[in-house]
Image (cartoon, grey):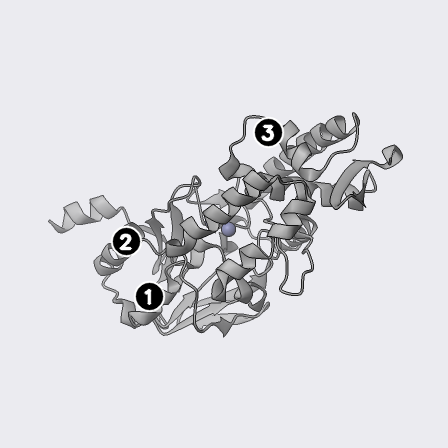
Amino acid sequence: MKQGMAEKFQLHEIRPGIFQLELPTPYPIGPVYVYLIKKDPITLIDVGVNSPESLTALRKQLQHLGVKINQIERLLITHGHSDHYGAAQTLKEEGAKAVVIHPRDWDKVTDRRDYYLRMKPYLAQMGMPSDYLEYFVKFIVWETPYARDLEEVQNLRDGELLFWEDLKLEVMHTPGHSPGHVVLLCSKEKWAITGDFIFTHITPDPIIDITPSGYRTPSMPLHMESLKRFAARGITTFFPGHRERKGRTEAALKEMKKRMKHKRESYLEILAKGPLTPFQLMRRLYPTSRKGEAFVLLSEVIGRLDLLEIDEAVISWRKAGLIFYGLKEGKI
Ligand SMILES: [Zn+2]
Ligand SMILES: [Zn+2]
């Protein structure tokens, strides 16, 4: 019987006392990996969405490991996206002691609706038509049950050291994919738990972020900067939040560079034909994309345009309430 259960759950002990749990999400990315550190203080890194399916999967796996929710001292959230923090408030109400997250993502996890809605005027300036904007609002409503707002969050600082009896992890702030994203480094053994910061085969797209004061965070340039700082830390193995259970830093960075170069060329090729709004550019790049994909794809486009603007390959300007991008020589 015990044997059967172990097979069913296929618990992955990535390091002694550290378990990689797999939880379902309603998103196209598929399941999310969260990490249980079964050492004192018991810590869960990311928690999955707030759906009955995910909570049941989490409870079963914790039970199998002999951990009760009220024994969890700390829910450590890598970043404020629903697949990583969505169930935290529910787990807190069931007895988990504290939720820690970098302050730059507090606004999202305490008022998700406001965070998304303040993007709306900005998306309109980027050329997103009204039927797409309506769809975006529908998405916010659809997602609501999967991500409960947190009532109380505690600070997680860059450079902070977290200690267990035989383990020390360093919090590294890696803004980009999300402005408050953090990864956890074990410098001694050269591995890290990395949330949505780095993957081998997918580009972790920096999502559009408007601060409560209305400033647009340059997500992609920040992400590139974070990758550089991460690469300098000599971490060889990472345990991400999705898809691959384990990745190699060197291979992932190499793949990413290849993808970036390829995309840069296609962006410049399209803009050579004339200036476009980011939304128009997104439709040229992804003509068959669906409405539900528009926000993530637009995030990618804006991120790459930011990089091209820093490189002085493109410039942007406003005209009739819209933002246009064109090759540096092609301004109208
Ligand atoms: Zn994310
Ligand atoms: Zn994720």
Going by the numbered disc 2, the residue's amino acid type is Pro
Element carrying mark 1: helix
Name the foreground residue: 297 vs 39: 297
Q: Which residue is mark 1?
A: 91
Q: Quadrant of residue 26?
A: top left
Q: Is residue 72 above or below residue 136?
A: below
Going by the numbered disc 1, the residue's amino acid type is Leu
Residue 199 point in image, percent of width and height:
52, 43
* Structural distance between the alpha carbons of marks 1 and 2: 12 Å
Sooner in the amino-acid sequence: mark 3 or mark 1: 1
Relative side of 85 to 206, left or right: left
Name the foreground residue: 269 vs 175: 269
Residue at point 56% right, 52% down? 235
Q: Which residue is mark 2?
A: 52
Going by the numbered disc 3, the residue's amino acid type is Tyr
Residue at point 61% right, 44% down? 299
Residue at point 28% right, 71% down? 70
The image shows a total of numbered marks equal to 3
Name the foreground residue: 147 vs 4: 147
